[in-house]
Image: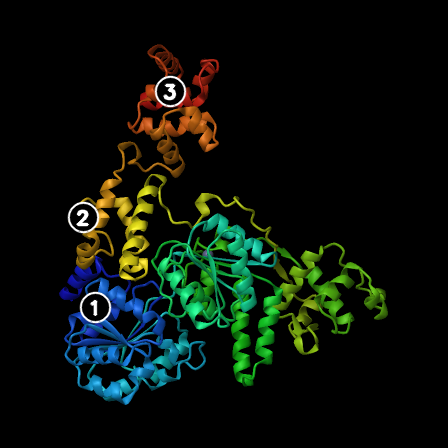
């Protein structure tokens, strides 16, 4: 274990293990098997990488994600680890060289695709090699009910049969209880040590909005939260992905489409740009994302509803793998629900499978409609416990209002009934609102008792009521009969007035610029650090381009953020930054230290004041003219003086030079203050009034900042 810690520090640049990493590593060092469930970004890979380095021989990593292997290997090589991969993308010659390296024990870690591993030739090679351990990544792929099912995974028990003495570790980030049992059974891991570290991704903020103009809502979200970040926007169809990418590009963002309808070269090129450049938005169908391990995806936005909570969790889980704040944002509408139910109905799947898919979709809908904490609802789905309120989801931050909708819900249901369960939402809403047309008259529905009884609610309100009745399964949309609404069993007690029906109040769409900075999930770079931050990122990009790797292989954003906060001056200080190990210090230390040293933080800006105060100080440093600062910041002079008063109070600025007052004026203010009664000395107003408004509030504040006890 001593050696494991040493490797953690010197190679990976971290000083302590997280979650249950230490226990898991100990299991493998003791030659046990292990099953590990750890959320994305929790540091799963260290659990097998470190024991592979400690133990004699090579760590064999089985992963279905071929597209990811190159980056995984590059990342390890940048740390000075001897890593390679074997998959179908290699030429015969390249594969041969790697096989030789394997046989002569010249590798620390080797990544293999499952189909490659199962070939007799590879198994034979492995039996002639010195193997430290087998790591089976993405172990949930064994589950035939899951959406990532890989038949080859079910044959991986061969590892146990052929190499009974070599310890195995199976890892996954998504697995409900049933999948866990399947993993244990299929991989013959009955005697494995099981580690479940929970599913929570505390740095991700969940928010889900319904109805409305989802595109405009997306735009507001991007403007408010992610004006210049990398992210993924998921759409249900290829067309929508294309349209949305084009629309975002027209609006000035760098957006690229990705879906199975594009040819392989374009897909590959778009994916490369997403990985290598900063600030690219990938607009994709669910075809995108497997095998993407970009740590600094700052948001995942859904423009339509995923078909299950697992899919939602996995897709949103691509945000914030570096542990920094990230957003999982979604806007969906009634059409999504109908389309997804239609998909299930029309598929060739068995009835059992259809029932499972319906149940999964219903769970996703409850998550979308819930008025409770989203995180709690999400974690409950995975049998994981959570605090009552996470404080980092839309429902916690801005609790939704509910209203008693029993009355209109009954109107809606009985109108559906009186129209013989033979019409769609639009028609029924028209009847409720008393809007007659030729069709309604032909059907004599203008003579119904429910005709016009719903004028107390708007069209939008009715649509919201119907959506929630459908999602909550009081109404069924029969697709075989052109989307007509039908009552379900569940609607009876409501119709008989034996049950109440609570609804979420429709939220007003958020307007641009209404988000207060405290509620925002942006990365926090202080204004005084912005220049250094930009310079470090530019340096990282240049080094990455030189070596043909994505920027995060050089350093994660988290490491750069730590650099601007700590401003290390020497190699030893740089080593204290998380993610800086010996190899990286050797390769990049000089460059990054050079940049940090060329952006010294002036004394005035070396403070913990709020961002707005620092913005003022930054301008003050360039030009101490209060009028011009007030103009540039579009703030009142009083506010600017108040900001500067913070620096005066901290001894960073001198009140006289800030205010431009002469000795006499300065003394007048002090004397006035001293002449006040004690109870007035805590406030500025009595001084201001005693001086008959001769001096600005902010000016007085600056002078007192220097003189008050
Ligand atoms: Zn919450």
Q: Where does label 2 land, which residue?
A: 573
Distance from Cα at disc 3 to Cα at disc 1: 60 Å
In the picture, measured across the screen, residue 155 lies left or right of residue 512, that is left
SS type, badge 3: helix
**Nearer-the-camera pick, 96 or 124:** 96
Q: Mark 3 points at which residue?
A: 659
Label 3 residue near ligand 1, CB within 8 Å: no
Would you say the residues marked 2 and 3 are in contact, meaning their CB atoms lie under 8 Å apart?
Answer: no
- Residue pictured at 21% horizontal, 68% vertical: 50
Check disc 1 and report its element: helix, strand or loop.
Answer: helix
> In the rendering, at what x and y percent does residue 67 appear?
36, 71
Image quarter hosting the N terminus: bottom left
In the image, taking residue 497 as reference, residue 195 lies left or right, namely: left
Q: Mark 1 points at which residue?
A: 50
Task: Mark 3 and mark 1 in contact? Answer it, CB < 8 Å.
Answer: no
Q: What percent of the width, then of the height, locates residue 114?
A: 32, 81
Residue that appears at 56% across and 54% down: 217
The label nearer to you, 2 versus 1, is: 2
| Left or right, residue 393 beside residue 130 | right
* Labels in figure, total: 3
The relative height of residue 217 versus residue 73 in the rendered view (above or below) is: above
- Graded by Cα atoms within 10 Å as few (under 14), some (14 to 19) or many (20 or more), the crowding at tag 1 reads many
């Amino acid at each position: 274990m001593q050696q494991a810690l040493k490797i953690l520090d010197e190679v990976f640049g971290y000083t302590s293990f997280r979650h249950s990493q230490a226990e898991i590593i100990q299991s493998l060092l003791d030659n046990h098997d292990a099953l590990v469930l750890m959320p994305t970004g929790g540091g799963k890979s260290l659990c097998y990488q470190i024991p592979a380095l400690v133990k004699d021989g090579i760590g064999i990593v089985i992963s279905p994600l071929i597209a990811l292997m190159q980056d995984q290997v590059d990342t390890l090589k940048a740390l000075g680890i001897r890593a390679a991969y074997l998959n179908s993308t290699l030429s015969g010659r390249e594969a041969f060289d790697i096989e030789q390296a394997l046989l002569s024990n010249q590798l620390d870690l080797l990544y293999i695709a499952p189909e490659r591993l199962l070939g007799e030739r590879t198994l034979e090679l492995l039996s002639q090699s010195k193997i430290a351990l087998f790591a089976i990544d993405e172990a949930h792929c064994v589950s035939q009910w899951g959406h990532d099912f890989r038949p080859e995974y079910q044959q991986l028990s061969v590892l146990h049969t052929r190499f009974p003495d070599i310890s195995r570790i199976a890892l996954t980030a998504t697995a409900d209880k049933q999948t866990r049992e399947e993993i244990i059974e299929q991989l013959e891991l009955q005697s494995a040590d099981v580690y479940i570290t929970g599913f929570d991704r505390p740095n991700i903020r969940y928010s889900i909005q319904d109805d409305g103009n989802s595109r405009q809502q997306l735009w507001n979200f991007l403007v408010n939260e992610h004006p210049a970040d990398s992210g993924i926007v998921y759409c249900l169809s290829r067309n929508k992905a294309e349209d949305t990418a084009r629309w975002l590009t027209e609006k000035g963002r760098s957006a690229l489409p990705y879906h199975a309808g594009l040819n392989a070269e374009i897909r590959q090129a778009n994916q490369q740009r997403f990985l290598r450049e900063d600030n690219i938005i990938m607009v994709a169908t669910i075809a995108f994302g497997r095998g993407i391990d970009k740590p600094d995806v700052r948001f995942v936005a859904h423009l339509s509803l995923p078909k299950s909570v697992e899919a939602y969790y996995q897709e949103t889980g691509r945000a914030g793998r570096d542990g920094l704040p990230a957003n999982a944002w979604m806007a969906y509408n009634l059409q999504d629900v109908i389309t997804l139910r239609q998909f299930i109905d029309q598929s060739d799947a068995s009835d059992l499978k259809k029932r499972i898919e319906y149940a999964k979709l219903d769970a996703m809908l409850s998550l979308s409609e819930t008025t409770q904490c989203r995180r709690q609802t999400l974690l409950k789905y995975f049998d994981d416990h959570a605090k009552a309120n996470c404080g980092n989801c839309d429902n916690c931050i801005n609790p939704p209002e509910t209203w008693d909708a029993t009355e209109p819900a009954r109107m809606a249901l009985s109108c559906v009934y009186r129209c013989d369960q033979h019409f769609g939402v639009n028609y029924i809403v028209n009847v409720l609102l008393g809007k007659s047309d030729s069709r309604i008259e032909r059907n004599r529905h203008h003579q119904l008792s429910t005709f016009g009884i719903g004028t107390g609610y708007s069209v939008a309100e009715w649509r919201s009521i119907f959506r929630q009745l459908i999602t909550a399964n009081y109404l069924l949309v029969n697709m075989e009969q052109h989307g007509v609404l039908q009552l379900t069993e569940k609607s009876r007690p409501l119709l008989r007035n034996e049950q109440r029906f609570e609804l979420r109040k429709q939220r007003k769409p958020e307007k641009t610029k209404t988000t207060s900075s405290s509620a925002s999930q942006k990365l926090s770079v202080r204004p005084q650090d912005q220049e250094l931050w930009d310079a470090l990122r530019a340096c990282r990009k240049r080094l990455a381009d030189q070596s043909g790797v994505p920027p995060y292989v050089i350093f994660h954003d988290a490491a750069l953020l730590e650099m601007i906060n700590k401003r290390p001056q020497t190699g030893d200080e740089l080593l204290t930054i998380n993610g800086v190990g010996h190899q990286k210090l050797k390769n990049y230390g000089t460059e990054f230290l050079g940049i940090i040293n060329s952006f010294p933080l002036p004394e005035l800006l070396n403070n913990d004041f709020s961002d707005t105060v620092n913005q003022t100080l930054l301008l003050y440093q360039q030009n101490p003219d209060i009028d011009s600062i007030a103009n540039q910041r579009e703030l009142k002079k009083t506010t600017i003086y108040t900001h500067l008063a913070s620096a005066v109070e901290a001894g960073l600025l001198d009140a006289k030079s800030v205010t431009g007052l002469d000795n006499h004026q300065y003394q007048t203010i002090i004397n006035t203050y001293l002449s006040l009664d004690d109870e007035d000395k805590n406030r500025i107003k009595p001084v201001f009034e005693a001086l008959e408004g001769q001096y600005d509030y902010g000016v007085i504040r600056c002078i007192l900042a220097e003189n008050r006890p």
